[in-house]
Every structure is written in C-alpha cells, then in structure tokens.
Image (spheres, rainbow, N blue to C red):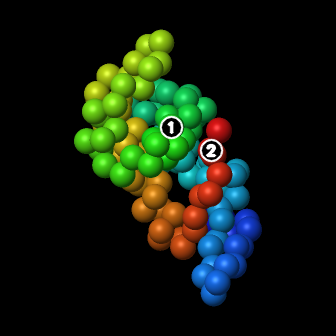
Amino acid sequence: MFLEAGLVHNFAGARWNIIRLWEAETMLRNLASADSVLSRLPLNFLSEEIDWIRDRDLSSRAEYLALTRGRKRPLQNEHRNAVFSLLEKYRAELDRHDLENDRKLE
C-alpha cells in the first residue's frame, strides 16, 4: 500500500498530513482481516463503530466498554474489545507513517 499525505494542512507553523480516504479504508481492512473476530464483520460496520468512538472522543478501552452503543443488536464485549484494539492499531499505523485522519471513515 502506498501511503502519502492526501492533503497537507498548515497552520501557525504546524503541518498535518491527512491520509486519503481510500488509503484509510485499505489500512483498516488490512488490519481487520488479520483478526479472527473482526474479519467476519463488514468494513462499513467497523468504520461506523470507529467513527462513533472518535466522535465521542473516547480515549480508553474502559470508557468505550462502559458506554451503551444503542445498536439493535449490540456488540458483545469480545467484539467491542477487538474493535478498540483495531482502533489502537489503526492509530499506531497512522503515527508510523506520520499521517492524520481528520474525516469519517464511512
């Protein structure tokens, strides 16, 4: 996968390299496919769940697990733990490539 900034933001001397949406989706798909729990779930479902976590600015697994998601069929704790691990891996990959994701994945 070729990763480079899709958009560069400059403000007050700071610079943010923004990942392209298709690259973010590819990265997320690759990370999820390596997990036996997450590989069975559709990418759009995982993207929505990660966006939900990000929208609420949840920074810890405990915060995420403590909240009720409100889905018709709620995720079991095993799935929620796997989703949060996926988000941590996704953030680590972004950091490794010096990229940011400032938009929704879905």
From the image, tell me which residue sits under label 2: 105
**Can residue 53 be seen?**
yes
Looking at the rendered image, the disc whose residue lies closer to the viewer, 1 or 2, is 1
Q: Position of residue 35 (x, y in %)?
A: 39, 39
Q: Residue at x 43, y 62 (%)?
A: 92
Q: Position of residue 56 (x, y in %)?
A: 46, 43
- Residue type (three-letter) at the residue carrying disc 1: Trp
Helix, strand or loop under label 1 = helix
Q: Position of residue 95 (x, y in %)?
A: 48, 68
Q: Residue furthest top?
A: 72
Helix, strand or loop under label 2 = loop
Can you tell which quarter of the image residue 82 is in?
A: top left
Q: Residue furthest right?
A: 7
Camera-side residue: 1 or 18?
A: 18
Callout 2 environment at 10 Å: few (<14), some (14 to 19), or many (20+)? some
Taking 5 as reference, is 93 left or right?
left
From the image, tell me which residue sits under label 1: 52
- Residue type (three-letter) at the residue carrying disc 2: Leu
Q: Is residue 95 above or below residue 63?
A: below
| Quarter in which the C terminus is drawn | top right
Q: Is residue 48 above or below residue 20?
A: above
Q: Position of residue 32 (x, y in %)?
A: 47, 41
Camera-side residue: 4 or 17?
A: 17
Whole-number angstrom distance, CA of label 1 to CA of label 2: 10 Å
Q: Is residue 38 above or below residue 73?
A: below
**Can residue 32 be seen?**
no
